Every structure is written in C-alpha cells, then in structure tokens.
Image: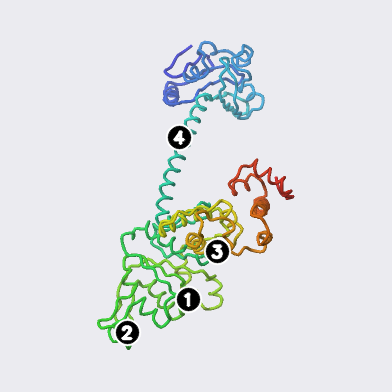
Amino acid sequence: MREMSNIIFSEDEDLKCSKYVFKILNAILKYSFSGLWITDGKGKVLGISRASEKISEIRASEVIGKNIMALQGKGFFNKSIAIEVLKKKISVIRTQKIKSGKIILTKGQPILDDKGNIELIILNDWDVTYLNKLREKLKESQILTKEYRFKLSRVRIKDLEGNNIVFKSKIIKRVIETALIASKVNVSILLLGESGVGKSLIAKLIHKYSPRANQPFVCVNCGAIPEFLIESELFGYEEGSFTGASKGGKVGIFELANEGTIFLDEIDTLALKLQVKLLHVLEDKKIIRVGGTKHKKIDVRIIAASNQNIEKLVEEKTFRQDLFYRLNVVSIFIPPLRERPEDIPPLVNFFLDKYNKEYKKEKIITSQVINSLYSYNFPGNIRELSNFVERAVIMTKKEKIELEHIFQLGIKFDKNFPILLEEKELSLKKAVDNLEHFMIERAIKKYKNQIKAAEVLKIDQSTISRKVKKYEIQNNDML
C-alpha cells in the first residue's frame, strides 16, 4: 500500500498512474473538503481520501483492497451506494448510515470504459451532521438578519410616522417600497388614487429620500388655481405682460422649485394649452415667463397626481397622450382605505393622539367603535377618517368615545350594516352583539377561514370559533 499526502492507494498492478497524474490528483484532493472513495469496476476499494477517513471514522488500512460488498456485510455502512451504482450503472446520491451511527450523504458516479462497462466508481461523502450544524448556523444568521430588518423597519416606520404616513397593510408597504426605489432615480412620477388616500404624503416621502432632499419641495393644487392665473403662477410673468402685473414681474413656481421637486396635484385639471407648455418643460428643461421671450433653464423633478382615470381622459382627448407618457415613467397607485381596512386602527390611534394634543383632550376610542369602522366605506378615505376622529375628540362630552356616538358624528354605514343598530329601543348590549355578529360573518365570508378572520379582527381563533357557534354563522367556503 502506497501512501500519498492526502490519499492512500493500493499497489494494485491495475492502477498504473504517472507521477504527474498523482501530483495533479493530490493537488485537487488537498483542498477538497468532501470525502472521496475510489473503487474498481467490481467494487474493490482502490483508495480513500484523508477526509473520508475522518468523515467515516475509519482507517484506510481497514478498507483498502476490500470489496465494498464485504464491507457492507461487516456493517461499515447499512447499504452501500457503490453496490447500487454497480447495479444501475447510473449516478446515485442519497444518505447512508455508517458503522459509528453517523448519517452521511454519498454520491456515487460510475466511470465507463469505451464499451460502456464500469471501470471505476467515484464516491463523494459529506458529513450530514456538520451540514446540519451549518444549517443551524445559517438559520440563526437568518433569524438575526430578520431581527435587524425588523428593527430597521421599525426605525423607518417611526420616520414615516413623522411624515404622517401610518400603515399596517402589506399593500401600502409595497407602495412605500416602490416610492423609495423611485425616489433615487431622477424620473417623473405619476401618483394615482382616490381623493384623500395620501398622494401628497407619498410625494413628500419621495422628495425626502431623493438626492434633491435638501432643495425646495413645492406643492401646487392645479384644480385650486383659476385657469386664467395658473400659467403665470407656474411659469411666472414679466413686467407689463398684462394689466395688474407687478412691477419687475414675478418668479413662477417652477423657478422657485429649481433643483428641487414640484408636486402637481390634480394634474388632470390643466387646460390643453398648459399641457402643451408643461410637455415642453419636461422635454427641454426650459421655461418662458408669461409675456417673456427668453428661455430660462430649470432643473426640476416633477411628481404629478390625479384622482381620475387618466388613460380614459386620454381616450376622451381631454388629456394629451404624449404628456401622459412623459409623466408616467413610474406610476404608483395608492389604494382606497376600504381596500386596506387593517390600516384603520393605527390611523385612528394616530389621529386620536394628534387631536388630543391639539385640543388638550384625553379622549379614548373603544375597540367596538374601531371595529365598527371596518364596515364603513370611507369615500373620503384617510382625510374623512381624520375628520371623523377630530369631530369625535371635539364633540363628544364623555372621555370615552363609544359606539353610540358614531351615528351622532355623521358616520352613515352602507346597506350591509346591521339595521337594528338604528332602532331607538334597542339596548347597547344588543346593538354590540349585532355588530359583532355582522363583523365576524363579514370577515369569514371575505377571508374564507377562521384563522385569517381572527387575525384581522384581532381576536383569538378560539374566540371566533365560539362566536361562530353562538351566532350560527354559516359559510360553505369556511375551512
């Protein structure tokens, strides 16, 4: 038996290798972490690596020159991979149990001669125990990474709350992630969504995290400025350009926002004439004041917003298609509050804290009131919810804002809301029961199972299961 640095070979006459081949083989094996066995075409062990001795907890002298079937018979392993390779004549990989009781992963690869017969078998071993330890370390690392990400997200959420961006829903999380990605790139952005969903807050967020953060952020509500004034407001005017023009002219909003960001809300209200001018600003990066002849270079990032379907406006020829394409480099849709009811509780708490401080109150809102708000459509979205909480803080005489107050404050529920709540002779307990019945039934029908419904309603699954039986709630899709 001849011993090389990392592998031990038998002095079998069939194994005629040059010193150069041995040198190359040993150089490879020197840095090989996995174990290595080599058998001939009949299963006789020709050599094993030092790594295999360590992994299999055997000595080379115990197996060199022995047939793999004999070794299996002596209990060196429960079922030899080499024997399976000899039978199937294909590569085989699976775990096997060795003499020490350790589980190892072994791959057997047949080496065929010109006639298709097995000439050699190469067997690679991996210590599964060690791999499991590595897997555990990786799992620990992933847990730590998750914790760090969670802590970082908490920091970001606190930062976002400083901008009045409060959310819990995954859909708004995706909106914010998209906004943060887009903020780093100097392109036009189009924000879409119903009135009151928070488009201006997202615009401010984009500016805050953009390279222009230290430059001006100018917000313009295009729908709030009379049509005959908006051109001069946006682009400024020269002295004497029209009756009543200020001496020396006036700087426009685009010039004020130079090197910063301009947020054009309700962009769809711009007249076609102004849409053409805005298109030229986007393309040429220049403006001309009203009554002027000289171009002024500007460097402004435009964020536009609309609560209308602009594609439909393009089809109706009331909004220019080329301007739409220019503005719509990145489009972000902000869904209405009714499509993300899980954002209602954190928003209520945020507004409650805000208005308590503003009006020097210490009001609290019961969980029944918050749960009842899930069933309301909120056509005015977050702005309407803010208005409701503000009125509740101001108008309710008691410290606790309860279910009975919501009708007094003007909240009108949709037709699916329990009508018995409006009966004058109905006790508060009965009204709460009806509302509870309604909320649970509505959640189960929407989410199709009790687990998700309980999660959304912030109650235990055992509680919702008991309530389902109590109210005899039926749902054929319920798991």
- The residue to which callout 4 is attached is 141
Q: CA distance from mark 1 to mark 4?
A: 53 Å
Q: CA distance from mark 2 to mark 4?
A: 65 Å
Is 91 placed above or below 446 here? above
Q: Dot 1: few (<14), some (14–19), or many (≥20) neighbours within 10 Å?
A: some
Is 283 placed above or below 187 here? below
Location of residue 359 in the rendering, given as x and y in whole percent from the top left corner: 42, 60
> Which structural element holds mark 4?
helix
Which of label 1 and label 3 is nearer to you?
Answer: 3
Q: CA distance from mark 4 to mark 3?
A: 51 Å
The quadrant in which the C terminus is found is top right
Which of label 3 and label 2 is nearer to you?
Answer: 3
- The residue to which callout 1 is attached is 269
How many marks on residues? 4
For residue 289, side relative to residue 26 (left or right): left
Location of residue 452 in the rendering, given as x and y in whole percent from the top left corner: 62, 47
Q: Image quarter for residue 240?
A: bottom left
- The residue to which callout 3 is attached is 409
**Sequence order check, earlier mark of 1 and 2:** 1
**Sequence order check, earlier mark of 4 and 3:** 4
Question: CB atoms at circles 1 and 4 under 8 Å apart?
Answer: no
Which of label 1 and label 2 is nearer to you?
Answer: 1
- The residue to which callout 2 is attached is 291
The residue at 51%/22% (across/down) is 36
Which of label 1 and label 4 is nearer to you?
Answer: 1
The residue at 38%/60% (across/down) is 207
**Sequence order check, earlier mark of 2 and 4:** 4
Q: CA distance from mark 1 to mark 2?
A: 23 Å
